[in-house]
Amino acid sequence: MSTTVQDRTTARERASAAPESPVRSRGARVLLLFSVFLCAACGLVYELALTALGSYLIGNSVMQTSVVISVMVFAMGVGSLAAKPLQRRAVGAFAAVEAVLALVGGLSVLVLYLSFAWLRVYMPAMVVVSFVVGLLIGAEIPLLMTLLQRIRRQEAGSAVADMFAVDYIGALVGGLCFPLLLLPTFGQLKGALVVGAVNAVAGVVVVLWIFRRQTRRAVRTGLLIGVTAVLAVLGSVYVLADDIEVTARQQLYRDPIIHAETTPYQDIVVTRSTAFTGEPDTRLFLNGDLQFSSVDEYRYHEALVHPAMSGRHESVLILGGGDALALREVLRYDRVRKVTLVDLDPAMTRLARGFEPLSELNGHALADPRVTAVNADAFNWLRDARERFDTIVIDFPDPDTAALAKLYSVEFYHLLKQVVKPDSRVVVQAGSPFFAPKSFWSVATTVGAAGYRTTEYQVDVPSFGNWGYVLAVPGTDGAAPALRLAGDAPRLRFLDDAVLRAATVFPLDRRPQKVRASTLMDPVVLEYTRHEWQNY
């Protein structure tokens, strides 16, 4: 009798543990692992989208990445623990988790962008969204492990190995697809929505199909209705995404936006005033930072270019300056025979070449036969450059990110020596001596530490305020470069020799400060810039 009871008990345990025959197949296991692959890819895309958005909107990419990753990893641990009670109903629980994750992850970029544009609570919102996404991703693994074991029992080590191998491969594919496919094709907002839809199908439909005979009809119906609702929401937002983005973005700018695009490198916005009197004001913003105003940009670009052109200038190199306004000033010299412009973002040079408000402002400079435009990272381009130039104009944005700080490092200015001649003149835009004095003098100190003699000067540009530059010549022996205009300088609107003489005089509270040179390993200019500009 006892044996019979024992046999019946064992039989019941086996029946409860053993899946039905359709789930035993190798095809079901492969299909489930494919679902793991897709979910892992989607999870990493959410993480990358959050870090990229923060870098565009706030800057400080190191901080954004650190906060997002640390919060998500912590939340994943919490999610794994929270999923333990759900393993008894693993199919329904996993499908529900994926449906919610698809909705939250797909809408995450939109929610954070709206929080930044309208509510101005970006950082708290980012922490909350990162935590929720991480919580749901963390709940995936225990539930998926349970589902895999239902298909075929394995040793714990083998099951973990299979699961994480597929999970990590999915993360690799997701990490590569984000910059190479999703951003160029859909942009950040629509890209996240597309990934959310993929996540919903992979996590809900696939799993419900595999375990359809183990799931009650009412549960299947409820989950399918839920995922249909999620896809409907994501699809509706996708259709309205452009209008939503334009409306939200406009909240960030005073004047109407006439062009906006997000590239793999930056967020580009062009605005134009609609004043009924006076000159229209066209403005370029990169990642929210003003790059120029058409009303007074000539002051900035004349001060940047013409003092450097007082030496030989048959061949000129411009690093940065993709808007081609510095290039316009260079091309005003008849003696210029060749200009090479190196700018990272092809979208920026394409805009400067073909977008009428910019191309008219720069005088169609990129169409000049003397000009060669190269889209490349200036640091890496210099490592392979062999041609030498008479004049070098460096017109990068302020060093408020790690990627830009490397372009203001001792190592960068050492690389620059590969393209300078003994009598070359180099000019660097160095930020504001008034608003960011430590940053400004750090740039000057860094150029000097790389083996150049320098002359610092400043002018007033109403849109920017007080702005500064560093004029440099190679070598540590001899006099600092004189600040003057070339004999063949064209007629200028702002700059003359009297203005240049005054430009070298700094007030008492903005004269040279004791600051450190910036290097790749110690980018102090980045910290100076962030600290000084945070109050403006």
Image (cartoon, rainbow, N blue to C red):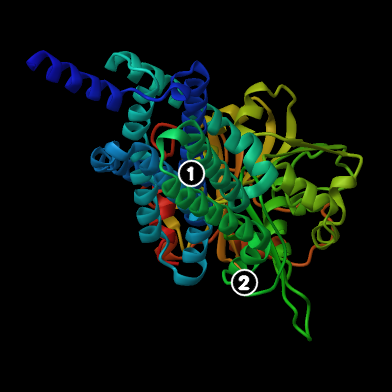
Type of residue at label 1? Tyr
What residue sits 29% from the left and 42% below the top? 79
Residue 118 % position (x, y): 50, 71
Label annotation for residue 46: 1
Badge 2 local density, few (<14 within 10 Å), some, or many (20+)?
some
What residue sits 38% from the left and 58% below the top? 123
Residue 242 % position (x, y): 67, 61
Mark 2–mark 1 Cα distance, whole angstroms, equals 41 Å
Pick whichever of labels 2 and 1 is earlier in the sequence.
1
Residue closer to the observer: 452 or 441:
441
Residue 9 % position (x, y): 17, 22
Query: Looking at the image, which residue sits at the far bottom?
Result: 277
Badge 1 local density, few (<14 within 10 Å), some, or many (20+)?
many
Disc 1 is placed on an element classified as helix
Q: Can the viewer see residue 332?
A: no
Q: Quadrant of the C terminus?
A: bottom left
- Residue 155, compared with residue 473, is above or below; it is above
Residue 180 % position (x, y): 64, 34
Type of residue at label 2? Pro
What residue sits 88% from the left and 39% below the top? 370
Q: Quadrant of the N terminus?
A: top left
Disc 2 is placed on an element classified as loop
Q: Is residue 349 left or right of residue 71?
A: right
Q: Which residue carries the number 2 mark?
A: 462
Closer to the eye: label 2 or 1 = 1
- Residue 440, compared with residue 460, is above or below; it is above
- Residue 386, compared with residue 428, is above or below; it is above
Residue closer to the observer: 269 or 105:
105
